[in-house]
Image (spheres, rainbow, N blue to C red):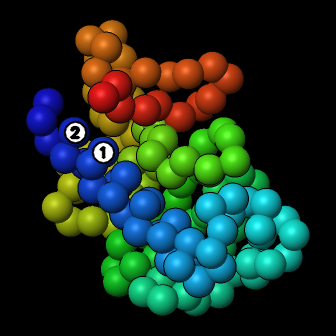
Amino acid sequence: MPEIFELIADFNQMAALVAKQFYNKYHRTDLLSAYHEKIIPKEGKLGILKYYSFHGIGIYAEIGNVEIDFDFGPGPENKSDGFDCYRLAKFAKSNLKYSRFKDELVVNSLLEKLAVEGSIFLPQPSRNYYLDV
């Protein structure tokens, strides 16, 4: 089970790194608002991001050969530390270190176990889990 925590930690670290590229360039933490106000372009390259594209309430980005897709959490600070089985599995597919987690059903099963244990939680109405720290 510790490997799933490592996957979650790396996913969250990568999401924070993506968000930081925008914070540094645009000096805004409300990235979705800045995108909707057309301050931040919908897609492009930025800093270490080979490519990024905003979508709905999230963003897809490529750093090196690793792909990440995450939704921003609620509130003006646009938290980037939420995760779900689809996004973790997609992240794992582009990261050889986590190839055993590329199956969404495997990841979902592990997340459900962690939720029952109380290690992660799913605030309503969010679709994203968060670490219970």
Question: Residue 87: image x %, image y %?
Answer: 47, 49
Separation (CA) of disc 2 from disc 1: 6 Å
What residue sits right under mark 1 in the picture? 8
Name the residue at the right extreme. 37
> Which amino acid type is marked by label 1?
Ile
Q: Is residue 95 left or right of residue 41?
A: left
Q: Quadrant of residue 14?
A: bottom left
Name the mark on residue 4. 2
Question: Residue 131: image x %, image y %?
Answer: 35, 31
132 lies above or below 72: above
Tell me if I can see residue 99 in this picture: yes
Q: Which residue lies at the image location 28% right of the left edge and 21% below the top edge?
A: 119
Q: Which residue lies at the image location 31% right of the left edge and 14% below the top edge?
A: 118
- Classify mark 2: helix, strand or loop: helix
Near-viewer residue (98 or 56): 56
> Which amino acid type is marked by label 2?
Ile
- Classify mark 1: helix, strand or loop: helix
Q: Which residue lies at the image location 48% right of the left edge and 41% below the top edge?
A: 82
Q: Is residue 7 left or right of residue 126?
A: left
**Mark 2 neighbour density, 10 Å: few (under 14) some (14–19) many (20 or more):** some
